[in-house]
Image (spheres, rainbow, N blue to C red):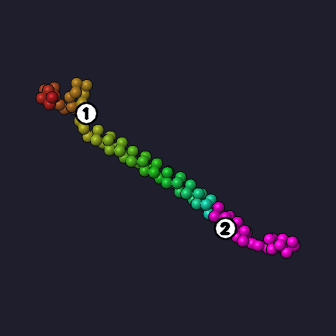
């Protein structure tokens, strides 16, 4: 009986399995932490890109709007007479 108990406690194959399990768990935690950080940075980068594109789109629309002749309340463009407006229609 003592011999079998000694043999049982002297085996270390289970310890190796536990060690591999712990190493695997630590690696999984490291991967999760890294992907979380990268994901947050990537999200911020895309938000910056979208906001810059929106700002560029707005400024382009403003420039196009400023380049078009402005119409007064009667529908005539600046420098256009009422007769020219009627011919345009």
Q: Is residue 40 magenta?
A: no
* Of 37 and 66, the residue lying toward us: 37
Image-based side of 38 in relation to 74, left or right: right
Q: Which mark is residue 30?
A: none
Circles 2 and 1, Cβ within 8 Å, touching? The answer is no
Percent from the top left, x then y, of residue 82?
16, 26
Q: Residue at x 73, y 69 (%)?
A: 15
Image quarter of the N terminus: bottom right
Q: Nearer the viewer, mark 2 or mark 1?
A: 2
| Residue receiving disc 1 | 70
| Residue receiving disc 2 | 20
Percent from the top left, x then y, of residue 79?
19, 32
Q: CA distance from mark 2 to mark 1?
A: 75 Å
Q: Is residue 19 magenta?
A: yes
Q: Which residues are magenta?
A: 1-25
- 10 lies above or below 85: below
Q: Looking at the image, can residue 49 be seen?
A: yes
Is disc 1 placed on a helix, strand or loop?
loop
Image-based side of 13 in relation to 42, left or right: right
Q: Residue at x 49, y 54 (%)?
A: 42
Image-based side of 42 in relation to 2, left or right: left
- 47 lies above or below 81: below
Q: Within 10 angstroms of label 1, few (less than 14), some, or many (20 or more) residues?
A: few
Residue at the front extreme, as displayed = 1
């Amino acid at each position: 009986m003592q011999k079998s108990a000694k043999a049982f406690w002297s085996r270390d194959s289970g310890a190796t399995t536990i060690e591999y399990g712990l190493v695997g768990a630590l690696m999984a935690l490291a991967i999760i932490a890294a992907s979380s950080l990268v994901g947050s940075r990537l999200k911020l980068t895309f938000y910056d890109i979208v906001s810059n594109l929106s700002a560029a789109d707005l400024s382009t629309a403003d420039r196009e709007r400023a380049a078009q002749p402005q119409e007064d309340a009667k529908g005539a463009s600046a420098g256009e007479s009422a007769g020219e407006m009627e011919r345009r229609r």
